[in-house]
Image: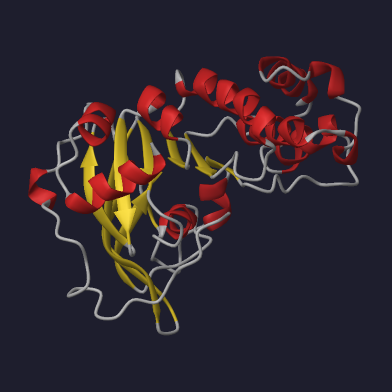
Amino acid sequence: MSDEPKPVGDPVADAPASSPSSSPAPKSEGKVVVSANAITKRFGDVVALCEFDLEVRDGEIVVLIGPSGSGKSTALRCLNGLEEPQEGTLQVLDYDMLDSDTDMDRLRARVGMVFQHFNLFPHLSVLKNLTLAPRRVRALADPEVLARKLLARVGIEDKALAYPDQLSGGQKQRVAIARALAMEPELMLFDEPTSALDPEMVGEVLAVMKDIAATTTMVVVTHEMGFAREVGTRVVFMDEGRVVEVGTPAEIFDAPQNERTRAFLEQVL
């Protein structure tokens, strides 16, 4: 299920101890594509994010993990302008996300997002789901060639003329991934892309994500610890709206430094 923010008391006093200064620097030397500093997001009295920090560089696969309600999905939605923090600074692809003059449509043309519930257009065929945005936003005269190549890449080229209600959950999610890639984004965001799938369909979606990770900068919210360990370049553990610990997969899964991180991993591994 998607992260739902949960109430906290004093977010500073109640926060798990962490040592941001000890967090390893990003392994990639690429350009910074996401820079979030001290972001706070509230929904009424509920603090969903508290002084959230994140840096993502070109070529990285950053995976956000943590218990439900820890703020992972809220953080991801802030990166695409679907939620606006009340405090802090946030830049994505050099766009100031807290500036009211920022053109969010231009930003979203460069940032792909895959949701857990697919969000396909039910009245359009698979092929038209993929070609709609490139034709209208990028003004491509013939986006069908790229669309068919992407369907082949995700293993469902034979479903081009099918409609969403004729597809399995795994097939729908692969269409959603291909649709996001059709805009040739510079950054891909995945919000628990396997959580709504039957267990036997999870593997086919993760296989597609592993394939595109080789060539795409990604921020992924997931409960799939195997994917985080195998594909992630950095793993961010969150709890109660805060970043608790950041490290490489080996550092987080094999030698976590924070007690809260260790307790979480003992429950899920």
Q: Quadrant of residue 268?
A: top left
Residue appearing at x 43%, y 28% in the figure: 226
Viewed as shown, does residue 56 lie left or right of 77? left
In this rendering, position of residue 143 left or right of residue 251: right
Q: Residue placed at 68% from the left, 29% from the top? A: 201
Observer-nearest of 251 and 162: 251
Q: Who's the residue at 34% across and 63% down the image?
A: 241
Q: Position of residue 44 (x, y in %)?
A: 45, 84
**What percent of the width, then of the height, locates residue 53?**
25, 54
Q: Hey, which quadrant is residue 32 in on the image? A: top left
Q: How is the image coloured?
A: secondary structure
Q: Note whether residue 156 is visible.
A: yes
The picture quadrant where one finds residue 63 is: top left
Specify whether 88 is left or right of 177: left
The relative height of residue 210 versus residue 71 in the rendered view (above or below) is above
Q: How many marks?
A: 0
Where residue 105 appears, x then y in whole percent? 58, 53
Tell me which residue sits at (39%, 66%) in the image. 99
Of the 4 image quadrants, the one containing the N terminus is bottom right
Q: Is residue 187 above or below residue 44?
A: above
The answer to whether residue 34 is visible is no
Closer to the camera in the image, 117 or 142: 117
Q: Quadrant of the C terminus?
A: top left
